[in-house]
Amino acid sequence: MGNLNNEERAATMEKIRDACENWGFFELVNHGISLELMDTVERLTKDHYKKCMEQRFKEMVASKGLESAQSEINDLDWESTFFLRHLPASNISEIPDLDEDYRKVMKDFAVELEKLAELLLDLLCGNLGLEKGYLKKVLYGSKGPNFGTKVSNYPPCPKPELIKGLRAHTDAGGLILLFQDHKVSGLQLLKDGHWIDVPPMRHSIVINLGDQLEVITNGKYKSVMHRVVTHTEGNRMSIASFYNPGNDAVIAPAPALVKEDESSQVYPKFVFDDYMKLYAGLKFQAKEPRFEAMKAMESPSINLGPIATV
């Protein structure tokens, strides 16, 4: 990202455009977040897992008999997680077991990630030919975006061929910013029918696009299926922050990206909260039926009109 401020800006914007149109994922370096802050976040996250979550995870594995699994597990993920909400209101002070140092550092990290997310949204606007601020405004709703962090650990797994760390899915929301372990890999994306590793790179932030950006860009950018695979050795840390629309944000293809006849608008218009209610039960399934379901909800009058006139 350092090249956005010099003669390499155009080439860097082109890299971002290509990543958004053809991959749905890219890895940012020189993003402006303090490396010292990132190192502290990583250290305290790993300390917190060891101290507060490792034993609980082992008890969960034992209670479900996962270590003796004989066939593929399709209804469970090999992960230990907790969630932090930053916007519209923080819940960090309410999460049990967090040291004060850890709370403060995660608050500071969230502030930096929020700034980075909003900068990226404007870069995407630039590449899409949308006015600056358009994406932020659409995602804002009446109370601002939903912004939160999923802190995950993927401990060593005795049967990685049978148990996924996280099953394949697309993300429901807007822009996802991931700080992942630089020593233990596991994240993969689906590209042209093949699973491809997203390599760990120290101090990078991995960006991926959620379903809402696919809708707003009218399919120009796509959300991409991804998953986490497990390993027999190493504990992988993953801190994924989700910059999502506000609950009442109205999501629809940007008019500037829809041709005049509107036949090219292939995505529905809906309220984000309605999409999330649907997504909750269908996360690990294909996204296209979700879009179709929202489209059906969007225009009930088309189906009910003749009945209403009888």
Image (cartoon, rainbow, N blue to C red):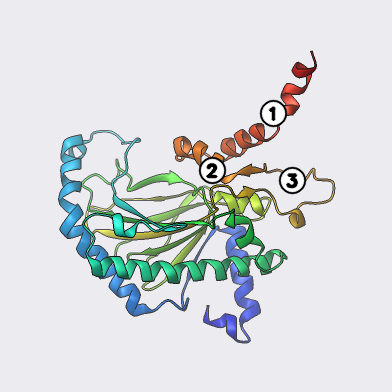
Quarter of the view holding residue 121: bottom right
- In the picture, measured across the screen, residue 26 lies left or right of residue 102, that is right
Distance in Å between CA atoms under marks 3 and 2: 21 Å
- In the picture, measured across the screen, residue 239 lies left or right of residue 221, that is left
Q: Please, which residue is most extreme toward the top here?
A: 310
Residue 149, percent across and down? 39, 57
How many marks the image carries: the answer is: 3
Query: Badge 3: how crowded within 10 Å, few (<14), some, or many (20+)?
Result: many
Quarter of the view holding residue 287: top right
User: Is residue 182 visible in the rendered structure shown here?
Assistant: no
Query: Badge 2: how crowded within 10 Å, few (<14), some, or many (20+)?
Result: some
Between 70 and 20, the residue placed more toward the observer is: 20
Please name the amino acid that badge 3 sits on: Gln
| Mark 1 / mark 3, whichever is N-terminal | 3
Between 78 and 262, the residue placed more toward the observer is: 262
Compared with 130, 285 (above or below) is above
Q: Please, which residue is most extreme toward the bottom here?
A: 6
Q: Name the residue under label 3.
A: 265
Q: Name the residue under label 1.
A: 300
Q: Residue at x 33, y 45 (%)?
A: 164
Q: Name the residue under label 2.
A: 273
Query: Badge 1: how crowded within 10 Å, few (<14), some, or many (20+)?
Result: few
Mark 2 lies on a secondary structure that is helix
Q: Which residue is drawn at 80% across and 45% down?
A: 262
Q: Residue at x 32, y 65 (%)?
A: 181
Please name the amino acid that badge 2 sits on: Asp
State yes or no: discs 1 and 3 in contact (Cβ < 8 Å). no
Residue 301, percent across and down? 73, 28
